Image: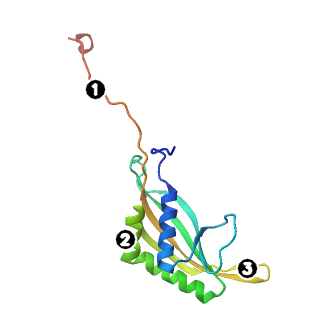
Amino acid sequence: MPNDNAGYDYGILVKTLIGAVNELSGGLQLIESASGGEQPEYPFCQYTITSPYIAISPDIVEGEQFEIVISLTWRALSGHQALNLANITNKYFRSQKGRFFMQENGGIVVVSVQNSGLRDTFISIEYERSAGIDLRLRVVDSYSSEIQEIDNISFTNENLGG
């Protein structure tokens, strides 16, 4: 049974990003970086949540808005293909279409798109070509705390000094 008071569900973020990458790329996959299982065919995109929680206001706990930084990296067999996909991703998340998709499907606000560029990896005797972006997103936490309400206060003459 899920806990409705557990705080922000990062699964919503991942599900929304999977839908966005699918839409912007014409059906290519988004997977978690450094995850088990078989690697999809090239090209594909990987995500890493690099900063899962950046406080905006330290005094607010219930219904708190906070920011997340997530890295999206396209893996491809050619550098230009990886760069093209990273550029499309950059444009998508900066566009009204991408911002609307994130808001409508996950309640996520795109704050900024950063660091579009090459991220090649040397594997054995060849390079895996990669390029990507970093997204700064704002979400709302669902955490709330139960507090006991005071229903009635009564005073007696002893306490009033009268």
Name the kind of residue labelled 3 in the image: Phe
> Can you identify the residue that label 1 sits on?
151
Q: Which mark is residue 122?
A: 3
Question: Secondary structure under badge 1?
Answer: loop
Residue in view at x 43 percent, y 52 percent:
141
**Which secondary structure lies at badge 2?**
helix
Choose between 88 and 16: the one closer to the eye. 16
Work out whether mark 3 precedes mark 1 in sequence or the reverse, and give the earlier one. Answer: 3
Q: Residue at x 40, y 51 (%)?
A: 64
Disc assigned to residue 160: none
| Residue 100 tag number | 2
Q: Position of residue 136 (x, y in %)?
A: 47, 67
- The furthest residue to the right: 125
Q: Quadrant of residue 78?
A: bottom right
**Where is residue 61 drawn, in percent x and y?**
42, 46
Q: Quadrant of the C terminus?
A: top left
Whether residues under marks 3 and 2 lie with C-beta atoms below 8 angstroms apart, the answer is no
**Disc number lying in front (3 or 2):** 2
**Marks 3 and 2, Cα distance to the nearest angstrom?**
37 Å
Q: Nearer the viewer, mark 2 or mark 1?
A: 2
The residue sitting at 54% across, 82% down in the picture is: 85
The residue located at (56%, 81%) in the rendering is 117
N-term-proximal mark, 3 vs 2: 2
| 54 in relation to 149, above or below | below
Q: Which amino acid type is shown beneath numbered disc 1?
A: Asp
